[in-house]
Amino acid sequence: MRATLRQSMAWLHTWSGLVVGWVLFAVFVTGTASYYRPEITRWMQPELGTRTALPPAAVAASVERGVAYLQTHAGAARGWFITPPRPDKPVVELFWRNAPGVPPGHVLLDPETGTPAPVRDTRGGDFLYQFHFELHLAPLWGRWIVGFCAMIMLVALISGIVTHRRIFADVFTFRRDKAARRGWLDAHNVTGVLALPFHLMITYTGLAILALMYMPWGVTAAYNGDTQALFAESGQVPRLRPPAGRPGTLAPLGPLVLRAVAARPETLERIAIRNPKDAHATVIALFEAPHGLAHAHPQIAFDGPSGAFLEGSADALKPATRTFATLVGLHEAHFAGPALRLLFFLSGLMGCAMVATGLVLWSVARLPKPGDRAFPGLRLVQALNVGTVAGLPAAVAAYFLANRLLAVDLAGRAEWEIRAFFGAWILTALLPLVRPPRRAWCEGLAAVAILCVLVVAADILTLPRHPVRGTGGDMLFAWFDGAMLIFAALFAVAARKVGRYEALARGARPVTASAGPTPVRIRGP
């Protein structure tokens, strides 16, 4: 233990933040991007365009076409999921789950013809969203790793609050002209304290959302581990009917869709069919969450063969369920309008900066004095810092760039985009192993800036109806490209500053006065 509580908390804050900081940076970056997950997906599928909302009869007809496709191509699947067309994604999206060990299926259909839509294959914003809490690992392993890191993040936040005596004054303190360590410390404090309520909220709610996976003992004791029974009893989902083991035929889904739409004021979001070829098939109409903090989707269940009404999820959720739904809503911000969502996005960027400056500060504070050699642990941390802080933004930019450069009809196209993501990340992570630390920082940050500019150039050159060309088009592409140019400018400025410090460090010489101060050596950060 250290001499005082504050010193102990400072030690805990320093080392807890370092141990999981690289994973937390990846979680913050992809989670922040996920606030614009639908917009990212639209940008990555420019063939979709936008249309006006369809009337209920047209929605019901599109669902019928989706069922016809699934009957032919996914008859052995355990579950069908049909997302009807909406203004921002005017296609019928089909997804089906097969037997264990068989990959699921996914296709987009033209709502008028029921044939596959000519849309490029991509994971879009969903890849970044799932990476945020699964790290592109097996779901169980990824969520456990992210949950462990989130718990350490909560410890780092609380210990940081205890450590700072002048926590409110730190919001207005940024001494960039002082020593490098002081500048990085002030940047870490400002980004941490300014969005501190957001950081605490987003970390705690992220843990609470997956609490049943981390602490399943209550469900195990009360429901014998049947989580679905808990969700059904709490009114979140309809009760799960076991399959009868006898073949059955689905009733026409068009009338069921019309009945469901007439029963709820919210927009229909998805149709789910459990055990579609069984006598106990269940058709579930899932609607968008009502406006408000609580993120709970109303649902209506019908018997598949007969079309009889089975049950609907309760509008008045029980207090515990509503509390959980509110925590989910706070974390995902589905309730937020454009201005509030932008505030969440900017707060997420400050979280990225807080983690990045904390990682850099750790290494800056332990730089060896002139003439000394860096210890191996410092070299490893410096390499990981460059590979994460510069590597992950480079990977995201490469992911967007691959979306524009890969052939639209390329087989396995979505997987090639993800390979481009990890390929760019690996290349940037290898950079500090072959280059001095400051040069690696400069080149890594410059690479991110160049990639962001290339994304904009590829978008304008490959889209005939890009708004910049004056041919109309969706303004989403102009806004997206403008954001990429802002990030390119920020990373270019950062690369220039690192390059300038590196030049000063190379050109500096000890300066001695005839009868004055001791020799001074100018050093970079």
Image (cartoon, rainbow, N blue to C red):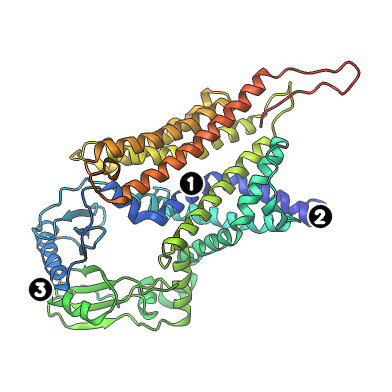
Amino acid under disc 3: Pro
Counting other residues with Cα less than 10 Å from the Cα at mark 2, is it few (<14), some (14-19), or many (20 or more)? few
Counting other residues with Cα less than 10 Å from the Cα at mark 1, is it few (<14), some (14-19), or many (20 or more)? many
Amino acid under disc 2: Thr
Q: Residue at x 15, y 66 (%)?
A: 63
- Residue placed under numbered mark 2 in the picture: 4
Q: Disc 1 vs disc 3: Cβ atoms closer than 8 Å?
A: no
Amino acid under disc 1: Ala
Residue 382 placement (x, y as % from top left) = 59, 33
Q: Is residue 420 above or below residue 163?
A: above
Q: Nearer the observer, disc 1 or disc 2?
A: 1
Residue 183 vs residue 148, the one in the foreground: 183
Residue 238, located in which quarter of the rendered image? bottom left
Q: Residue at x 75, y 56 (%)?
A: 166
Residue 356 placement (x, y as % from top left) = 57, 43
Q: Which mark is residue 252?
A: 3
